[in-house]
Image (cartoon, rainbow, N blue to C red):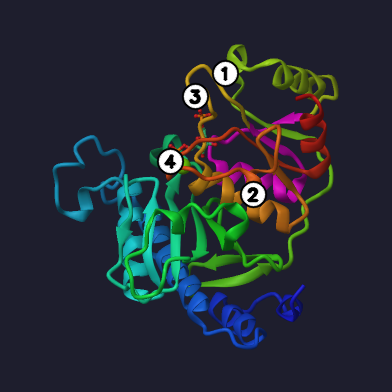
Amino acid sequence: IDETLTLPVGVTLDRFIKRQQSAFKGASGELSQLLRDIGLAAKIINREVNRAGLIDLTGGTDSENIQGEAQQKLDVIANVRLIRALKNGGEVCAIITEEDEGIIYTGNNEGKYVVALDPLDGSSNIDVNVSIGTIFSIYHRISPEGTLANEADFLQGGRSQVAAGYILYGSSTILVYSTGKGVNCFTYENSLGEFFLSHTNVIAPKNGNIFSINYGNYTSFFAPIKKYLSLCLDRSYSSRYIGSLVGDFHRNQFKGGIYLYPPTNEHLKGKLRLLYECYPLAFLAEDSGARATDGYQEILDIEATSFHQRSPLYVGSELMVKELMELH
Ligand code: AHM
Ligand code: MG
């Protein structure tokens, strides 16, 4: 655990990142700048999410053919804002996002990092004032600096992430990230326009009594999942499902619980995407003592073979995930 974790609650995200960087001898500061760029994009997205209903940013079937930003869907706006912030920052050479098919080059070929983004997760909740989130995952490029980044830079595997995090636009907006040395949370103070450190070194409860799953898919679950759900019911666990992964994950990280997205008839390999959703949350889970698996192996050990690859995801309190694994 690095010494910055002893900082008092109340420091700003910027100051925290700077202090964290100065604790690492030889750190160039580029990752710090990148995290600050994400913080800036988060503020802008937060503003758009908050006023979306007032300025016609909801909905969006008519969004594709219109150039003006005010008409774009929120997930497209979030995508644009994040890409712009990372392009302006200069530390990132390439980006992939859930919204785009291939690699987005920032024009900064000297940049050391590549980033995978789910700009606005929880599509079904976007237009109805329910929690949504942004998820990010950062890698140090393996291709030589000065060249164009390539596919391999993004397919290094979950354990190669140098940082990961999310922003939850919930009853308050909170930015949560880790560089592998503790998970820290920064709550947004609207009137000051700043993220302040609010939860340091999050440790997830070892066990819990919340299960989060789309029960409507029950008939298409396979035996281990049905068995696990019957255990949850026998024990009168609480069923809590927002349908926004970031929100469900965040709650379970604090209260103790498990989130499940198993294979279904519609999504034979699970619905969630390995690079944009599963890897980053698994990185945060492991760093806080929780666990993330696909039922058979740790999420971070799954080999990445394509940008939009999907995986089942079972993430949450260590003992709950362990019990589910044993049923597989
Ligand atoms: P999205 O990337 O289209 O938003 O889908 C991901 C979301 C997760 O946030 C959420 O947990 C899940 O999909 C909900 O799916 P479902 O509506 O099938 O329960
Ligand atoms: Mg998503």
Percent across and percent down for residue 201 are 74, 66
Q: Is residue 99 left or right of residue 43?
A: left
Give the residue type at disc 2. Answer: Ala
Choose between 50 and 88: the one closer to the eye: 88
Q: Assess disc 1: are there few (<14), some (14-19) or many (≥20) residues with their C-alpha within 10 Å of its C-alpha.
A: few
Q: Assess disc 4: are there few (<14), some (14-19) or many (≥20) residues with their C-alpha within 10 Å of its C-alpha.
A: some
- Cα separation between marks 1 and 2: 25 Å
* Residues rendered magenta in the picture: 238-260
Say which of marks 4 and 1 sits in front: 4
Callout 1: CB less than 8 Å from ligand 1: yes
Q: Is residue 16 above or below residue 212?
A: below
- Cα separation between marks 3 and 2: 20 Å
Circle 4 residue? 308
Q: Is residue 108 left or right of residue 205?
A: left
Q: Are marks 1 and 3 in contact (CB under 8 Å)?
A: no
Give the residue type at disc 1. Answer: Gly
- Cα separation between marks 4 and 3: 13 Å
**Residue at disc 4, secondary structure:** loop
Q: Earlier in the sequence, mark 3 or mark 2?
A: 3
Circle 3 residue? 267
Q: Are marks 4 and 2 in contact (CB under 8 Å)?
A: no
Say which of marks 4 and 2 sits in front: 4
The numbered dot on residue 216 is 1
Say which of marks 1 and 3 sits in front: 3
